[in-house]
Amino acid sequence: MRADKAHLWTSSKDFLGCDHVQVWLVAGDCFLIGLAPVLVHMSKGPDGKFPFHPVSINLLVEVAKTIFATVVLMLYQGTGRPGPPLYRSARAFVRDARHNQLLAIPAGLYAVNNYLKFAMQLFFKPTTAKMLGNLKILVIAVLMKWVLKRTFSVFQWEALLLLVAGITVNQLNYCNDGDMFSGVAIAYTLGSVTVPSLASVYNEFALKKHMDTSVHEQNFFLYFYGALFNLLGVLATMAFGGLSWTAIFHGHSKVTMLLVMNNALQGILSSFFFKYADTILKKYSSTVATIFTGIMSAALFGHSLTLNFAIGVTIVFISMHQFFAQGELARVHMLAPLI
Amino acid sequence: MRADKAHLWTSSKDFLGCDHVQVWLVAGDCFLIGLAPVLVHMSKGPDGKFPFHPVSINLLVEVAKTIFATVVLMLYQGTGRPGPPLYRSARAFVRDARHNQLLAIPAGLYAVNNYLKFAMQLFFKPTTAKMLGNLKILVIAVLMKWVLKRTFSVFQWEALLLLVAGITVNQLNYCNDGDMFSGVAIAYTLGSVTVPSLASVYNEFALKKHMDTSVHEQNFFLYFYGALFNLLGVLATMAFGGLSWTAIFHGHSKVTMLLVMNNALQGILSSFFFKYADTILKKYSSTVATIFTGIMSAALFGHSLTLNFAIGVTIVFISMHQFFAQGELARVHMLAPLI
């Protein structure tokens, strides 16, 4: 297993625990995440609803990512592995598909997660669903320990708890009551917290396991498998929902295409996070991006920043510093008895 | 200066950073702080208001503490200093009053603070006033650095920020709007945050400066000076407010006497905190006591615990662990380049 090579980047960290690759990944995430709500808003019809079926968006996003990965593969040519590239022949394709078969697992889990996200909306208000989703951070950390054999100091665990707390404080608003916690709701909650966490961690595991394989080839198969699963989902929706192909793909426009591109690029960026950084940095990055979006929207559109936003941001930044600066200290602490 | 001896207690700390003296101090604080709201509630008249003048409570509390300290002094006899005890003759009293003259400063500041607390109620809702008061924690830390030459690691500073955040999150409720921040309000806010912080830190400084002097003698003078200042305040209120002596001391009962005792005991306990621990532990202790009270009230009276209470408690406990476990690590970190 080449997972140890994946941590080479830690040696290039400066005092604050950052390195240049990570800065670019986070900056890209900020841009894409910031743009998303604008596009979502623009894509709504005059009645405030979406004129398109969300299932079609998921499929189009996977297809877009697959096309993107194919183009990049062709441009870069080398896959880092011997033999002709996967697009040269059916045999090369199958051979590479086998080599990357682990990626089918996260692809399938992500597809299941799309369904769960939709189902959670039936049980919970959007804000509550988001708050419950924050627990993914803790599940991810536990899974990273089991699957990737990562160890975290007690201060890093606390930092992750603080991240959950900080994000949740940010989401606290004045109407936090009334959501029902039935047995079914709890089951869906557990699923919607565990499935995407397992998907992300397994994704990171699979990408780092073959560190020598070109990330472009890995991306291709991740999205290819993803597109396959989503296509299955679309066909199932058509079969059980009695919708036609045209009904599912109705209502798209230039804006929805931009929405698809935005989601596709976020997915592609995620892969780079999982290969060259890790799932936890991805979580921190999304949080920073969301905070940045909130501040920009206050600055540009005059929305006021609430007290719990200020508190939440403070807690998140402290959490970040604690998490990334405590790895080295933890190791030093273990050496302390020798001093 | 004997402030360095005051930190002897750090060497008896166990893994979590606690030692037995501190545990008793915190337990005592929990009990007294938990009892206080019950007594306050019981002391209200049938119309929900207090039938007594708050100024009289302050004076009675100082007098009670002075009497208590005198009795203890007589019981323990030794003051740790040569010469007859202060109650033997006027000359001995004056000599000891001079030796402890530094304590007049915190006593005076506390008396001013009683007025500021009252004034803040005019500008802000009780919850907002409390939230602004949380900033005292940061002012105390800065003053400890300047006055007591304490150093804190960056993680300890962050832990204090988290303490403020956690307490504030706890106090967030659904009506956090509408308080005016005029120039006068800001001035009073700055005062009500700085004055008690300076009082507490100077108190700690004065008590630890003469570590060999009996804490009972120090307590006596702290409360004696406090009683003097409060008496001045009462006389001023009578002069300017046109109230008579009877009007000020009207409306007391057995319950108000218990309230006075409760406040007096809290004050006495504070002195022990300042002499044998420090101001920061006192702050954490009060916070833990408040949380404990909240949980007990939920358990005994069926009040529901809100989400922000749960989040606030989590943050406070993480803050506590971070603060008390990071002193040693900070020192180890400084040694790290030598490894």
Image (spheres, coloured by chain):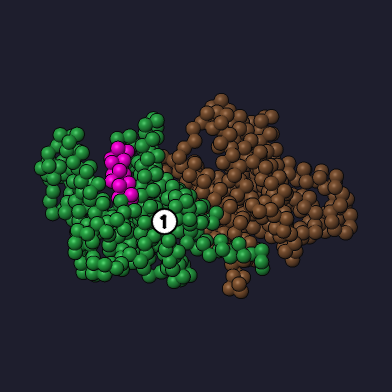
Chain colours: A green, B brown
Local secondary structure at mark 1:
helix
Q: Residue A75 is drawn in which quadrant? A: bottom left
Does residue A156 appear to the left or right of B3 in the view shown? Answer: left
**Position of residue A337 measured from the top left corner of the image (x, y, whole percent):** 66, 63
A115 in magenta: yes
Q: Nearer the viewer, residue B120 or A28?
A: A28
Percent position of residue B200, x then y: 64, 54
- The residue singled out by tag 1 in the image is A280
Q: Which quadrant holds residue A182?
A: top left
What chain does badge 1 belong to? A
What type is the residue that disc 1 sits on?
Ile
- Which quadrant does the N terminus of chain B fall into? bottom right
Mark 1: few/some/many CA within 10 Å (<14, 14-19, 20+): many
Q: Residue at x 63, y 35 (%)?
A: B35
Count all numbered tags in the image, as a single digit: 1
Residue B259: horizontal and vertical position, in percent?
A: 66, 36
Q: Which residues are magenta?
A: A105-120
Instruction: Determine the residue located farthest toward the top in the rendered image.
Output: B46
